[in-house]
């Protein structure tokens, strides 16, 4: 197995699987407002961003701000979180932004609401052991979520513009 | 070393600007997928299997981040421009071979510069990884093009 298996299949693994189940139910039951290509791009972007940020902030050098799951190595559930959880969450974020097409102050409120929601989910994750903080805190997470969701919307608008102004060659 | 790496990145961007023939969304999708796969491969190889050892200095760390997440994916994206510019199987094979060799050279250059050391990582590992990244780039290009054309047809 190229990814390390969990030391013990316990609360943090069940939390991840439960989150996947809830996210999948939401994704399939709630209406989709994005085109297929946008869904793919948004999910790919969030997967890429999660991997990049975790690899920079959570490796043992130079920052080591936090660890995820049971070990400090590349766990199977690290792969699952990067590949399934974050993309689905990112999809829901962009999907409803696209539906409501928030502008101006409402965009700021939208980002704030999602940042608070993410923070609550992260707090639950920390309690069950999905994340173990070394030199990190929920305050830093909140600031990170504000930046990440802002970046996410910026990239979404870029994708929209590129799809609108370019045709397949 | 980091400044040299960043300069190389901007040179590659300029090359891509010059040779680009794909839809920008196809390029971005290729870039993100290859970057993600490369991160996983390098992470697993160095942390889980201890096949690659990195020098623990800030300069080298950022050198590796730029190399893994930016340089290698950009090399793949540029390769895709040439790959899809021709319908000849022979020319496509030649493009893939050149791209593989360039990625291999990139791997061994990093070692020669002292950024990292291959402990159990072999030439064959680099070769297989380079081929897999190119195949993934080709696959995601086709998939993205299919999704874009579906979107264009429906409008």
Image (cartoon, coloured by chain):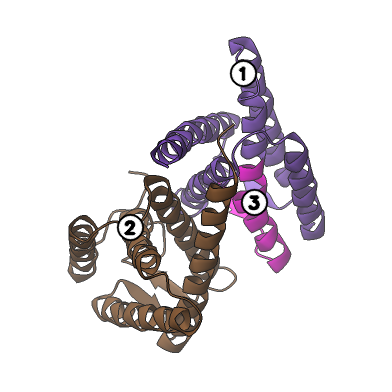
Chain colours: A brown, B purple
Q: Nearer the viewer, mark 1 or mark 2?
A: 2
Residue at the image point whose x is 69% and y is 68% from the top: B58
Circle 1 sits on which residue? B92
Please give the range of residues in magenta: B52-74
* Residue B60 lies in the magenta stretch: yes
Question: Relative to residue B26, is residue A5 drawn left or right?
Answer: left
Quarter residue B134 falls in: top right
Residue at the image point whose x is 61% and y is 31% from the top: B80
Is A112 drawn above or below residue B126 in the view shown?
below
Using the numbered discs, state the Cα–Cα distance from disc 3 to disc 1 in whole angstroms.
24 Å
Query: Callout 3: residue from which chain?
Result: B
SS at mark 3 in the image: helix
Is B2 drawn above or below residue A36 in the view shown?
below
Question: Relative to residue A80, is residue B88 drawn left or right?
Answer: right
CB-based contact (under 8 Å), mark 3 and mark 1 = no
Mark 3 surroundings: few (<14), some (14-19) or many (≥20) residues within 10 A: some
Residue at the image point whose x is 74% and y is 42% from the top: B17
Circle 3 sits on which residue? B70
Query: Callout 2: residue from which chain?
Result: A
Residues beneath discs 3 and 1 located on the same chain = yes
Disc ID at residue A156? none
| Residue A134 visible in the snapshot | no
Query: Callout 1: residue from which chain?
Result: B
Q: In x, y percent, where is residue A149?
A: 47, 72
Quarter residue B101 falls in: top right
Quadrant in which the C terminus of chain A appears: top right
């Amino acid at each position: 197995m190229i990814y390390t298996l969990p030391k013990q299949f316990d609360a943090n693994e069940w939390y991840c699987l439960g989150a996947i189940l809830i996210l999948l139910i939401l994704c399939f039951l709630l209406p989709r407002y994005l085109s297929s290509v946008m869904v793919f791009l948004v999910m790919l972007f969030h997967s890429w961003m999660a991997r990049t940020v975790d690899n920079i902030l959570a490796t043992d050098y130079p920052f080591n701000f936090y660890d995820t799951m049971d070990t400090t190595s590349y766990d199977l559930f690290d792969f699952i979180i990067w590949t399934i959880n974050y993309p689905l969450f990112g999809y829901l974020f962009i999907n409803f932004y696209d539906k409501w097409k928030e502008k101006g102050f409402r965009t700021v409120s939208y980002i704030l609401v999602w940042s608070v929601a993410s923070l609550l989910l992260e707090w639950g994750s920390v309690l069950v052991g999905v994340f173990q903080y070394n030199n990190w805190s929920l305050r830093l997470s909140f600031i990170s979520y504000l930046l990440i969701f802002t970046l996410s919307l910026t990239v979404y608008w870029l994708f929209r513009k590129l799809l609108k102004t370019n045709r397949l060659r | 070393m980091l400044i040299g790496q960043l300069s190389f990145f901007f040179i590659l961007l300029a090359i891509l600007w010059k040779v680009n023939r794909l839809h920008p969304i196809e390029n971005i999708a290729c870039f993100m997928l290859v970057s993600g796969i490369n991160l996983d491969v390098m992470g697993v190889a160095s942390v889980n299997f201890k096949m690659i050892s990195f020098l623990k200095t800030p300069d080298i760390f950022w050198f590796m981040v730029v190399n893994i997440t930016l340089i290698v994916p950009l090399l793949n994206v540029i390769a895709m421009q040439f790959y899809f510019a021709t319908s000849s199987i022979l020319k496509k094979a030649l493009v893939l071979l050149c791209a593989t060799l360039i990625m291999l050279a990139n791997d061994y250059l990093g070692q020669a510069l002292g950024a990292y050391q291959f402990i159990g990582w072999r030439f064959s590992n680099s070769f297989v990884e380079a081929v897999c990244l190119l195949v993934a780039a080709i696959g995601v290009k086709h998939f993205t093009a299919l999704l874009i054309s579906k979107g264009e047809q429906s409008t």
